[in-house]
Amino acid sequence: MLKQLFLFFAFTGAAAAAQAQELYVYTEPASNMAVNSLGVRVTSKLFPMDHVDYKGYRLQPEVMFGFSKKLMLHASTYFSNMMQKQFEFEGASVYAKYRFISLDDVQSHFRMAAFVKGALINNPYMPPMRDHDHAAKPYNNEELDLDGSSSGVSGGIIATQLLHKLALSGTVAYDRYMRNTKDEMPLFFSKNALNYSLSAGYLLFPRKYKNYKQTNVNLYVEFLGKSNLDQYRRNYYVDAAPAVQLIINSNSRVDFGYRWQLYGNMDRVMDRSFLLRYEFNFYNIRKQQ
Amino acid sequence: MKTILIAIAFIGAQLTASAQYKKAALQAAGLTCAMCSNATQKALKTLPFVDKIDTDLNTTTFILHFKPNTAVNLDQIRQKVEGAGFSVATLKVTANFDQVKVENDTHIPFAGQTLHFMNVKPQVLQGEKEVTVIDKDFVTSKVYKKYSAQTKMTCYATGTMAECCQPGAKTAGKRVYHVTI
């Protein structure tokens, strides 16, 4: 029964791959959002933590705006119980993406974009010790990111190919981590890291479009990697991150994903996590030029 | 001087009234998703001369119905599609012609604009006819290259009138839309 069900899904998946999607859940495509459109997003991540007996939770409210057909901006804030004694505001980041190549054909395109990101984070690099916590286990983490764990800057390149049956995207980015607002970075962290990802997505439903009210179901598989670059700290990981996405009313979306480590030798606290996101888009919010 | 201006304005208005764009079939390139299509449609809706839009999501084609007696700007249509992040694959405009004689590589004043007919046999256009805009960024780059190879006229590359159109004329720099039937 399970096998039949699996085969059924595999077949529908292959047949419906006629139109591909690139609204990736864990990465950004090289395409931008429409000019003068505003997107509002709330992303939450839930993850187990080995050193304590409660789950980690991070909330990321985010706004996005299309400034021109080539330039878009994201601004995010972060809240979590991961590094603090309670659920707290952790900091903010801004992200700008500039599309510099766009080759369009009917139902296909190739795009390339460059992006920069800056984050200012108020977290300590080690979680605080709790009072009389005799069950406390060691905290081992060599992973930093700009989504709540460290201040820093990042820059990278994205290439996205939409083919009739497949949307593929790759990202390469360099991260430079800097001290957090109150805390110096411990020496065992790598200040420099390389991020790389490969993403694929396709539309499962509807098989044929009828109108904008139809709910679309998109499936994604992404591979997300990081390599720490500093001497004596060179370690890496590669995660797999499949996700399901619902597009509702052609203006909002719900993402649900699970990410876990496939390979790697980096000590990590967040080596697996659930993701749940809601996004709503407002089109043409500014009067046209 | 003022009277002349008013007279020209009146003639212009009359020309617009008799010669009209009725609707356009626009196929957008570079997208498949419903959200992308919706963003494009919403952007096209902000154009002052667009009355209503029918969409075929499967072919990413938009049928734009124009308001009567309103000047239609084809460049603005293209800009809206590009602003949404995509581009124009084809733009077929349906217009009302009244005994308009066309020949290959001729300029026809139409609805306050100039149309340059390419790849056509001499004929007289009467009634509702569909013309396809073949200017740069109104077709895919492959199609544009194909037409570029067929003409030596620099106005096709720039979209504005040049010496090639009317030697000695002072209309250089004016927008001219290249179309075919």
Image (spheres, coloured by chain):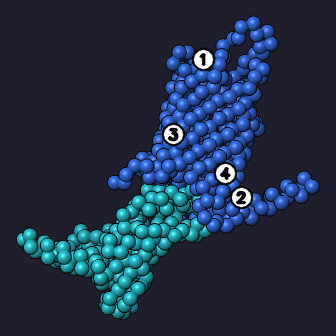
Mark closer to the observer (2, 4): 4
**Location of residue B1 by image quarter:** bottom left
Q: What shade does chain A have? A: blue
Q: Give the labeled residue for mark 1.
A: A124
Residue found at the very far right of the displayed protein? A1
Instruction: Have a look at marks 2 and 4 and say if they share a chain.
Output: yes
In which chain is the residue bearing label 4? A
- The residue type indicated by label 4 comes to Leu
- The residue type indicated by label 1 comes to Pro
In the foreground, B157 or A244: A244
| Local secondary structure at mark 3 | strand
> Of the residues under marks 2 and 3, which one precedes in the sequence?
3
Question: Alpha carbon of mark 2 to alpha carbon of mark 1: how far?
Answer: 43 Å
Q: Is residue A240 visible?
A: yes
Question: Alpha carbon of mark 2 to alpha carbon of mark 4: how far?
Answer: 10 Å
Q: Is B152 located above or below residue A57 in the figure? A: below
Q: Is A113 located above or below residue A226 in the figure? A: below
Looking at the image, do the residues carrying marks 4 and 3 touch, with CB atoms under 8 Å apart?
no
At 34% from the left edge and 79% from the top edge, which residue is drawn? B20
- The residue type indicated by label 2 comes to Leu
Give x and y (percent) for residue B139.
45, 70
Residue found at the very far top of the displayed protein? A132
At 37% from the left edge and 83% from the top edge, which residue is drawn? B96
Residue A246 numbered mark, or none: 4
Residue A215 numbered mark, or none: none
Q: Give the labeled residue for mark 2.
A: A204
Q: Is residue A151 visible?
A: no
Q: Give the labeled residue for mark 3.
A: A63
Which quarter of the figure is the C terminus of chain B placed in?
bottom left
Instruction: Have a look at marks 4 and 3 and say if they share a chain.
Output: yes
Left or right, B151 with respect to A198, comes to left
